[in-house]
Image (cartoon, grey):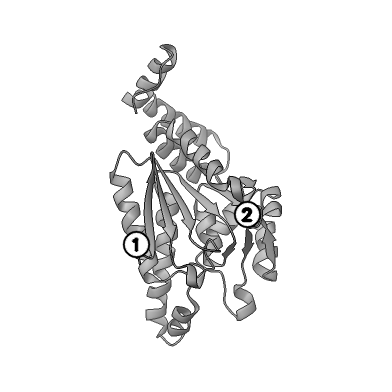
């Protein structure tokens, strides 16, 4: 049985975490397969969107505890290398040029919540729950912390990282961590609607917008930043994608991308 299933739905590639017997806990095999399939999808122009989802009763319960127990017996240097694999996966997702949608149901705990935070859009079913329980077992949500703080905000991150309490999907939506919170029966339809909307955009425009967001999110608003953003637009609008997009708009037709 494949621990990661890849399903094509139109222009979207759905990555299904498929270890339902352990609530899709992450191990090296799963992480390596996500990275490999992201590389394949990046090179395929017919793939415009990635959806990350989980089989069974949960999205992802975090790291495999048996793996963590083994890591605790490693030397500090080897343990750092081991932890670095997950850090690299999160960064790959965060910097991936195509948009990623998290389709969340059930538990998204610890590293699972980190996966969600590294995605661009989050759609959760009403029964979904998020949790950062690491401190309760003497651990720290280290590699996921940059993404959690960006997605959740520093003040809310303090609460949920320190208390380890569960965050219900509706509350996660209210405080901005989740973009859409829907009934379980509507989850796939809402994800597919987002995927369709994203597929209508220029692929290069999306990639540049994602890179731009990473740059300006915490940047001070200064004349220099204004010059840099103006340079981005000047560069983009002279390119073939923008010319085609503007022409198609004026001609009232769909763009060729």
Name the spot of residue 43 as percent of width and height, x first: 28, 45
For mark 2, give the secondary structure: helix
Q: CA distance from mark 2 to mark 1?
A: 27 Å
The residue labelled by disc 2 is 152
The residue labelled by disc 1 is 33
User: Could one spot residue 103 in this view of the protein?
Assistant: yes
If you read the primary sequence from the N terminus, does the residue marked by circle 2 or circle 1 appear first?
1
Q: Farthest front residue?
A: 185
Along the viewing direction, whichever of 144 and 183 lies nearer the viewer? 183
Instruction: Report the side of 231 relative to 121 (left or right).
Output: left
For mark 1, give the secondary structure: helix
How many marks overall?
2
Q: Farthest bottom residue?
A: 73
Q: What is the quadrant of the C terminus in the image?
A: top left
Label 1 neighbour load within 10 Å: few <14, some 14-19, many 20+: some
Instruction: Report the side of 106 relative to 72 (left or right).
Output: right
Q: Farthest top residue?
A: 251
* Res 165 quadrant in image: bottom right
* Res 245 quadrant in image: top left
At 51% from the left edge and 37% from the top edge, which residue is drawn? 225
User: Could one spot residue 239 in this view of the protein?
Assistant: no
Label 2 neighbour load within 10 Å: few <14, some 14-19, many 20+: some
Instruction: Report the side of 181 relative to 52 (left or right).
Output: right
Name the spot of residue 202 as percent of width and height, x first: 40, 31
Along the viewing direction, whichever of 71 and 51 lies nearer the viewer? 51
């Amino acid at each position: 049985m494949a621990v990661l299933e890849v399903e094509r739905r139109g222009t979207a590639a759905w990555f299904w975490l498929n270890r339902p017997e352990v609530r899709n806990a992450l191990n090296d095999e799963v992480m390596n397969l996500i990275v490999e399939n992201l590389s394949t999808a990046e090179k395929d122009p017919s793939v415009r969107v990635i959806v990350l989802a989980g089989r069974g009763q949960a999205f992802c319960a975090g790291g495999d505890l048996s793996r963590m127990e083994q890591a605790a017996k490693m030397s500090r240097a080897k343990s750092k290398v081991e932890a670095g694999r997950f850090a690299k996966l999160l960064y790959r997702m965060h910097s991936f040029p195509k948009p990623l949608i998290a389709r969340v149901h059930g538990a998204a705990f610890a590293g699972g919540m980190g996966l969600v935070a590294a995605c661009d859009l989050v759609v959760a079913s009403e029964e979904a729950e998020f949790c950062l329980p690491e401190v309760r077992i003497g651990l720290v949500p280290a590699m996921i912390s940059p993404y959690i703080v960006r997605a959740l905000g520093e003040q809310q991150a303090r609460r949920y990282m320190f208390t380890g309490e569960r965050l219900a999907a509706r509350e996660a939506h209210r405080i901005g961590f989740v973009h859409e919170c829907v009934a379980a029966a509507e989850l796939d339809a809402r994800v597919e609607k987002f995927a369709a909307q994203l597929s209508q955009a220029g692929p290069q425009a999306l990639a540049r917008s994602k890179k731009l967001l990473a740059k300006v999110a915490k940047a001070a608003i200064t004349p220099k930043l204004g010059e840099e953003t103006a340079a981005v637009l000047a560069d983009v609008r002279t390119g073939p994608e923008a010319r085609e997009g503007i022409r198609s708009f004026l001609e009232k037709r769909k763009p060729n991308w």
